[in-house]
Amino acid sequence: MAPAQSFTQTDFIREIIDEHLKTNRFQGRVATRFPPEPNGYLHIGHAKSVCLNFGIAAQYGGTCNLRMDDTDPSGETQEYVDSIIHDVKWLGFDWGDRLYYASDYYEQLYQYALKLIEKGKAYVCSLSADDIREYRGTLTEPGKESPYRNRSVEENLDLFKRMRAGEFEDGAHVLRAKIDMASPNITMRDPVLYRIKRTHHYRTGTKWCIYPMYDFAHCLSDSLERITHSICTLEFENNRPLYDWILDQLNLESHPQQIEFARLNLSYTVLSKRRLIELVQNGYVTGWDDPRMPTLAGMRRRGYTPEAIRNFCERIGVAKNDSLVDMGLLEYFVREDLNQRAQRAMGVLRPLRLVIDNYPEGKVEEVECPNHPQNPDMGSRKVPFSRVLYIEQNDFHENPPPKYNRLGPGREVRLRYAYIIKFAGVVKDEETGQIKEVHCTYDPETRNGPPSDGRKVEGVIHWVSAEHSIPAEVRLYDRLFQVADPMDQKDDFTNYLNPKSLETLTNGRVEPALATVKPGDYFQFERLGYFCNDLKDSAPGNPVFNRIVTLRDSWAKRSGQEKK
Ligand code: ATP
Ligand code: MG
């Protein structure tokens, strides 16, 4: 079942499909596919394509295939296949029994190549790779025809079969389409269709030593799967005539329509598998699933929900021109989603001891705390309150700056869901002068209610009981890069990594109910942000909380949007 969608949106792709339905171009069918190459983990850019392809299929009552576009053996692995399957499922989409592998089509693609040769539409070229490039010409000059261009059909068939049989060295020959070396579209200047490459393929092993090029394999895979709309990113616009040429030459009944849209670019990160591999391999991050990565695995570990990512993808829509989307917009959707579904809890990231002098020693009260301030259906929980608490270091200030509405000398604040307390003094480390603990008194009449004399207090701060709370490691994440567009700089993009993208706090304390959290559970820590118990590094009783997002919304404010 595809996730519920509003279907209110339309865009140029859906308009094309509507038109095809009207003219009956595909007999009323809508069949899309998501075709990742298993040479890396999926990132948020892929999510845009996943949501688009599966979303269209769901909207039109059609189908969407998941196809591993695995025709280049170098860098493709089963680990990547597994991760892709896991991530697309996690995003909430279902391809039924339509999981395909382009590598399963190798024999069929080879037969198509033979057919092209027989029709005089492809030839074996024995120029070196450098010469092929040289002969190709430029945007302003036409190319030159290869001296091998007029080999006979028989010779081409013989050579191509021997290419497959492994009689030649890598690079000795290639198979090329015979189109037009003077075409203004360089892609059409006799593009290479097959090359010899003795590289182990993660599925076919050493069965093949020739591999089809993307342009050849892709359109034919689409056709074999009877795709109707082959949606891809803008950089393939010039390849569309080749896509059509191959299908036309082979006279195939199923001839999908290729449609291009602008890829997603997101600020403060990079969305290219090649760059992401660099970050992983050179240890700039801890892996593909590092919570700072723009991969789906990283976002899942960070605590982003599939719903938030889908809402984001729906909101950005599709366009025909490239743009840079603000990371704050994605964070906005994460926050919106978590605000509704995350239980509230109290946690103290940088603890400061707070002693309530007039609270009886040994006494423990259970304070009732709602799990969600706007949603009583989410219930409540009891949090132990005692004489010694922890509060956040920055919720006390000896010389409070203007507008500081927390605890300080002479001040009163409310402890969230509990009493009003009044400052009584501080204890400092004799040597360093650092504040070791703050003392205060509490007003027993103010539990859950306003003071009877109507006096106002400064503000509300959160707390946990020193004795009852449990320790937690907390990881605070910031943007992976310091600049909005790391790929648009003069020097290497890794020079722009944010050295402060991760801050680890090891002294955190959280309320005791969180002793039983499971990996992946998330909460709003009151006043601090949303946090997710790490999928990998947490253990029972030893939570590790990743900060998903803060509570501050940078996007809605900046863009003048009303908050819902
Ligand atoms: P990368 O540039 O990260 O290596 P790719 O295009 O080589 O990406 P593929 O595995 O070939 O990666 O992509 C699978 C599908 O996802 C393709 O249809 C591609 O167009 C789409 N896709 C990849 N990156 C983006 C992006 N940033 N925005 C939207 N769609 C994308
Ligand atoms: Mg690709």
Image (cartoon, rainbow, N blue to C red):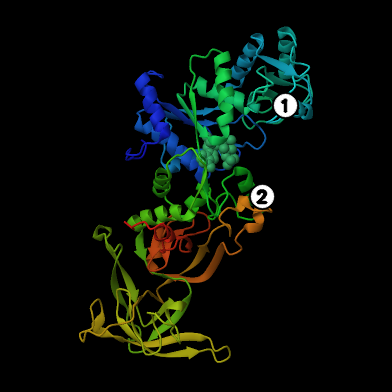
Percent of width and height locating residue 403:
39, 79
Q: Looking at the image, which is closer to me, 92 or 521?
A: 92
The residue drawn where x is 34% and y is 55% is: 341
Residue at the left extreme, as displayed:
452
Q: Which residue is mark 2?
A: 281
Which kind of residue does numbered mark 1 sit on?
Answer: Arg
Q: Is residue 378 visible?
A: yes
Q: Is residue 100 above or below residue 334?
A: above
Q: Which residue is mark 1?
A: 136
Which kind of residue does numbered mark 2 sit on?
Answer: Gln
Which circle, 1 or 2, is nearer the viewer?
1
Secondary structure of the residue carrying tag 1 is loop
403 lies left or right of 86: left
Crowdedness of circle 2 by 10 Å Cα count: few (<14), some, many (20+)? few
88 lies left or right of 118: left
Q: Quadrant of residue 22?
A: top left
Crowdedness of circle 1 by 10 Å Cα count: few (<14), some, many (20+)? many
The residue drawn where x is 44% and y is 53% is: 329
Secondary structure of the residue carrying tag 2 is helix
Q: Disc 1 to disc 2, how far (Cα)? A: 35 Å
Q: Quadrant of residue 26?
A: top left
